[in-house]
């Protein structure tokens, strides 16, 4: 055989071996190999992650998930004004000479539109800079909610349509949305007053009619979902939005920055709503900034309230904001116990954020306990960066992975953050070098540790497996 023929034969032989090797790989292995080949190409990586099935979003505040552009459209429809000094929506009449611009002007005035978007989100935000004064990132983030509250309270159906459609377009199959449709229980709490005897407090609220909050909440959710279904054309199979296929459950918000009688009443109402009012509600969660004065002062009290009602209603799931703190926001003593108390006292099955875990007393023991109890953590990378300044190697995300604590990537407030689930996964891959098997495990966690009913969870997991098989079959050798 000539030298040239030998080279040709060798080339063909190697090519055949490579082809056989490629064919021998499973679809998952081929997909993993492709994933590694694009790891350093953000555009290709983003496209891959957008197409990848992403399971569920377990930590998503509805009002914070809506983009400012939508709030502008709602305010224009409602004939509201934008107060350029207070940077908030206001009731009409509008008067531009007094800084009260018609919201509808922002539909054509690019300068006004940009001003509103920047006021309602973290876009282009620079801490302590003019014209926003002395706001920190945390202040600007949380202050946004009050600025658009005038419209967010009246457009729940449209808001659901936007957020759920976005989830569907990103190949999510499940969401747990935090929502506040209970507008009665806080008033009942104020009416009956406070006593630190929980049995007596519960009896006062029973006499005051706390159970009457259930029907209005159900009616409000029925109306909002009907509007969402109409907007997404869910009754028209040929033209239905991808969001129509997303299974949605709701978490009742409790506003922990309010007086104890209101918090107690809201927790009681939340447990009642989940327990006997509506199967769509699956959990109760205290919200509002964790470093707020009342949130910090009453943290232990709130945990004991949750523990009290958990004993009465053990079927009600609990996820709790805990550890959304960083050094400097509060004194060191305030960083030492929130996550542990949520797990050990507050009966938390999941933790929202958990960003200060390594500031806790005996953090490694706590991590081992969470892993053993399978207390999952809802990881919100973008908001932890924007609110707390915790990102990259300062974030405990890889520590949770190391110690076997279940994690699920979540969006938190994707409208205020100007993010979405795809970019949360992109941030995770770029910052922490996740492998494809790690990604698929995190995605599965987002269903496995959801609070969906067992039969629904089983269907979601089966569907997730099918989606991954279809996704991986597109990566041919």
Image (cartoon, rainbow, N blue to C red):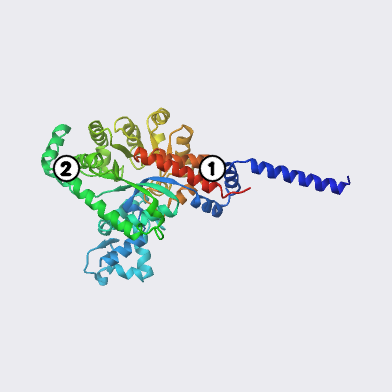
Between 279 and 191, the one lying in front of the other is 279
**Image height check: is 275 above or below 60?**
above
Residue 325 visible somewhere in the drawing: no
* Picture coordinates of residue 189, whole percent (x, y): 16, 43
Could you tell me if the residues under marks 2 and 1 are in contact, i.e. CB atoms within 8 Å? no
Mark 2 and mark 1: span between their CA atoms? 48 Å
The answer to which quarter of the image holds residue 169 is bottom left
Q: Nearer the viewer, mark 2 or mark 1?
A: 2
Q: Is residue 116 left or right of residue 37?
A: left
User: What residue appears at the point 13 percent right and 43 percent down from the top-left corner?
Assistant: 209
Rendering quarter of residue 112: bottom left
Tell me if I can see residue 252 in this picture: yes
Q: Which residue appears at 39% of the width and 28% of the height?
A: 369
* Rendered view: 62 above or below 204: below
Find residue 291 and report its horizontal and vertical position in percent.
31, 42
Residue at the right extreme, as displayed: 2
Tell me if mark 1 has few (under 14), some (14-19) or many (20+) residues whose alpha carbon lies within 10 angstroms of its own: some
**Residue at x-position 52% and y-position 45%:** 469
Instruction: Please state the total of marks drawn on the protein image.
Output: 2
* Residue picked out by circle 1: 436
Q: Nearer the viewer, residue 354 or 19?
A: 19
Disc 1 element = helix
> Residue 33: where, in percent of width, then height?
60, 44
Q: Quadrant of the N terminus?
A: top right
**Residue 211 disc label:** 2
Q: Nearer the viewer, residue 122 or 267?
A: 267
Relative image position of residue 312 (x, y in whole percent): 22, 32
Sooner in the amino-acid sequence: mark 2 or mark 1: 2
**In the displayed structure image, the side of residue 208 where residue 87 appears, left or right:** right
């Amino acid at each position: 055989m000539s030298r040239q023929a030998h080279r040709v034969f060798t080339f063909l032989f190697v090519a055949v071996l490579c082809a056989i090797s490629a064919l021998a790989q499973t679809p998952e292995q081929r997909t993993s190999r492709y994933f590694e080949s694009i790891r350093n190409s953000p555009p290709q990586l983003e496209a891959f992650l957008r197409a990848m099935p992403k399971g569920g979003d377990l930590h998503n505040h509805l009002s914070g998930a809506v983009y400012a552009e939508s709030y502008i459209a709602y305010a224009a429809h409602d004939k509201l004004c934008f107060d350029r000094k207070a940077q908030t929506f206001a009731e009409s009449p509008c008067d531009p000479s007094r800084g009260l611009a018609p919201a509808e002007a922002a539909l054509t005035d690019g300068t006004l539109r940009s001003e509103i978007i920047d006021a309602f989100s973290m876009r282009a935000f620079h801490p302590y800079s003019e014209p926003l004064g002395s706001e920190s990132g945390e202040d600007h983030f949380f202050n946004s909610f009050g600025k658009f509250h005038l419209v967010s309270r009246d457009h729940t159906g449209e808001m659901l349509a936007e957020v759920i459609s976005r989830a569907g377009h990103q190949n999510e199959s499940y969401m747990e949305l935090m929502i506040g449709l209970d507008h009665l229980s806080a008033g009942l709490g104020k009416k009956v007053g406070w006593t630190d005897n929980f049995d007596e407090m519960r009896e006062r609220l029973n006499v005051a009619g706390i159970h009457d909050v259930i029907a209005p909440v159900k009616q409000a959710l029925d109306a909002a979902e009907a509007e969402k279904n109409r907007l997404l054309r869910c009754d028209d199979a040929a033209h239905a939005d991808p969001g129509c296929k997303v299974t949605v459950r709701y978490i009742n918000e409790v506003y922990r920055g309010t007086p104890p009688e209101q918090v107690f009443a809201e927790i009681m109402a939340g447990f009642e709503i989940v327990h006997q009012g509506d199967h769509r509600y699956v959990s109760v969660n205290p919200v509002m900034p964790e470093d707020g004065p009342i949130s910090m002062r009453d943290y232990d009290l709130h945990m004991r309230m949750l523990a009290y009602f958990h004993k009465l209603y053990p079927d009600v799931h609990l996820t709790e904001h805990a550890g959304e703190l960083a050094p400097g926001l509060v004194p060191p003593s305030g960083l030492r116990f929130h996550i542990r108390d949520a797990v050990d006292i507050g009966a938390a099955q999941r933790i929202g954020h958990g960003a200060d875990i390594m500031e806790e007393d005996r953090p490694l023991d706590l991590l081992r306990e969470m892993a053993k109890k399978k207390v999952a953590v809802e990881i919100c990378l973008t908001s932890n960066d924007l609110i707390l300044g915790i990102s990259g190697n300062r974030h405990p995300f890889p520590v949770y992975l190391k110690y076997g604590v279940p994690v699920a990537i979540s969006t938190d407030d994707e409208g205020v953050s100007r993010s979405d689930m795809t970019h949360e996964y992109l941030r995770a891959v770029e910052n922490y070098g996740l492998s494809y098997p790690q990604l698929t495990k995190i995605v599965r966690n987002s269903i496995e540790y959801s609070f969906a009913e067992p039969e629904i969870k089983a269907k979601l997991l089966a569907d997730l497996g099918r989606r991954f098989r279809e996704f991986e079959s597109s990566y041919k050798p």
